[in-house]
Every structure is written in structure tokens, then in C-alpha cells.
Image (cartoon, rainbow, N blue to C red):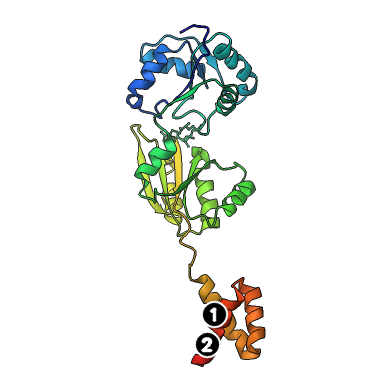
Amino acid sequence: MHSNKIGTLYVVATPIGNLQDISLRAIEVLKKVDRVAAEDTRHAMQLLNHFSINKPTLSLHEFNERERVGVLLAYLQQQGESVALVSDAGTPLISDPGFLVVREAKAVGIPVVPVPGPCAAITALSVSGLATDRFIFEGFLPAKEEARRQRLTLLRHEKRTLIFYEAPHRLLDTLQSMSTVFGSQRKAVVARELTKVHESVLAMDLAALIAWFTSHPDQQRGEIVILVTGAEEEKQHAKEVIPKEALAILLEELPLKQAVALASKITGERKNVLYELALSMKGNA
Ligand code: SAM
């Protein structure tokens, strides 16, 4: 595919465990490109060998991505080569290297073409039984307890389904932090070893998940996605109920106007709404 033309950067998703999940198009693209940029070249070679593909590889991992960007852009721009970017598993850039390359390639007008395929987060979500209409992907949480809790605290009231990646040796600690921050009754799902022999998807509340994994240490292995159900619809009525309660207390002690002004300050509800409410409460008294 050498030419004077600028090359194309293909972002190619690869299986997350089961090699049969590679797409026909991914194979075709890997066969036709000039070079494969891979997170781990040995790992990529295994994949390429499996499909009898023989290509020069170039490593691109989190520690050398910055310096490799220039090299890759030179292959694409100056040599007119086409390059496939793959990671160890799943979709590149999703908790994997590749962002800098894609950003820079696009900035200089190199065509960037997706070759979609597996992604552990979406695979887990699709069988989790949790709401799929709105979700957020949070990747890996910080490894340190304090930082992890802080991050989770920011997500405490998030209503969308939450998706996290986690390393097996941190599973219990993370479930524990989630239980502390989200409450032990919050429903969650631990999806392990997806598409592999020991695939399992366990849905329980956080307390039950902690108990289960504590009593099954052999199950704390492998690759893991944790999904947590979104915070319950925050009591939509909170604004109505709390202002009403505040008003009722204040009206016992204060004139109506003052009670309304204070209730508005306390609850954030608009004064005219509270005024109407106060009048109706007085009327019913
Ligand atoms: N780019 C990948 C993707 O598209 O899913 C993710 C790469 S990230 C470095 C690796 C993490 O993804 C693992 O620690 C685990 O949380 C999750 N993961 C990857 N493969 C998985 C699998 N087969 N089952 C469950 N989780 C998996």
C-alpha cells in the first residue's frame, strides 16, 4: 500500500478473550496494512500468527506513546503507509493506549478509520441486566483507598449505570469502598472473564457481592468489569416535601411572609411557590 498518498490509520478492535470474536473486517484490515502498532508486540504477534498474518509491528504502550507519535505519523504521512493500531484486548484507546496518536493524526489530516469490535465495558453492560439507556464509563478507579473513595463520592448521586474496570486483586477493596459510599444495598454486577471459559456475571447488592467474593476467593481472579446501578431517582418530591415541612415548622413561629422568605433560603425553592403553598396550608389549618 505504499504510495505518495497519505496513509490511513485504522483503529482495530480485537477479541477480549475469545479469538472467534475478531471481525472479518479486522482480519482483512490487518492483512492489508503495512504495519501494526501494538500495545505489546509479542501479544499482537500471537494474534497475527493465529490468523496467519505476517506484518512488521511497532510497540505503542503507555510509557512510549508520546515519543512514538512522531514515528507513527512519519510512517503515515511521509511513507504513505497504512497502519493498524491494536491493543492487547478489545477496543484501543478504551483504558488503553492510542489517544495521543489518534488525536495527532486527526490534527494533521491523516484519515483515521474505526474497525469496531469487542469492548469489555459494553459486553458487560449488555448482559448486566442494569439500565442500558444511559450509562457512564469510569475506567479504572484510583488504586489508593482514599483517592478511590473520593472518586466514588463524586459519583454518589449519579443516576446513570456506572461501569468500572478493576484488577482482580483490588476487587474486594473496591466493592467495600463502593458499599461504604453508595450504601450496601446498591445493586451491582461483577462480570468476570467475559467470552472466556470461566465467564461469570454475578448480580447482587454490594453487601451480598462482598460476602460472596469473600467466601469464594478462587473467584477473585481474572479480568473484571464492575457495574453499579445508578442512584435511585433522587426523590423528585424532595423539593415539594422538604419545603412543605420547613414551611410548616416556620409558620408555627413566624408571620407568613417571614416564614416563606426563610423557607426559600433553606430549601432553595422559589418564594412565589412557597407563598402559594403557605396560603394553602394556612387555608387548610
Ligand atoms: N481496551 C479494552 C476494552 O475495550 O475493553 C480494555 C483494556 S483495559 C487495560 C483491561 C481491563 O478491561 C481489565 O482489567 C478488565 O477490567 C477489562 N476486561 C478486559 N477483558 C475482559 C474480559 N474478558 N472480561 C472482563 N473484563 C475484561
Judging depth in this view, the residue of 175 and 217 nearest the camera is 175
Q: Position of residue 21 (x, y in %)?
A: 34, 27
Looking at the image, which residue is at 61% across and 73% down? Answer: 267
Q: Position of residue 139 (x, y in %)?
A: 52, 40
Looking at the image, which residue is at 50% across and 6% down? Answer: 3
Residue under pointer 2 = 281
On the picture, is 73 further left or further right than 200?
right
Residue 191: quadrant of the picture? top left
Is label 2 within 8 A of ligand 1 (CB to nearest ligand atom)? Answer: no
Establish if 15 lies above or below 33.
below
Answer yes or no: do the residues labelled 2 and 1 have beta carbons within 8 Å?
yes
Identity, as a three-letter code, of the amino acid under mark 2: Met
Q: Secondary structure at mark 1?
A: helix
Residue under pointer 1 = 244
Establish if 143 lies above or below 85.
below
Q: How packed is label 1: few (under 14 Cα within 10 Å), some, or many (20 or more)?
A: some
On the picture, is 196 further left or further right than 105?
left
Q: How packed is label 2: few (under 14 Cα within 10 Å), some, or many (20 or more)?
A: some
Judging depth in this view, the residue of 277 and 170 nearest the camera is 277
Q: Position of residue 105 (x, y in %)?
A: 57, 22
Judging depth in this view, the residue of 110 and 216 nearest the camera is 110
Tell me which label, 2 or 1, sits earlier in the chain.
1
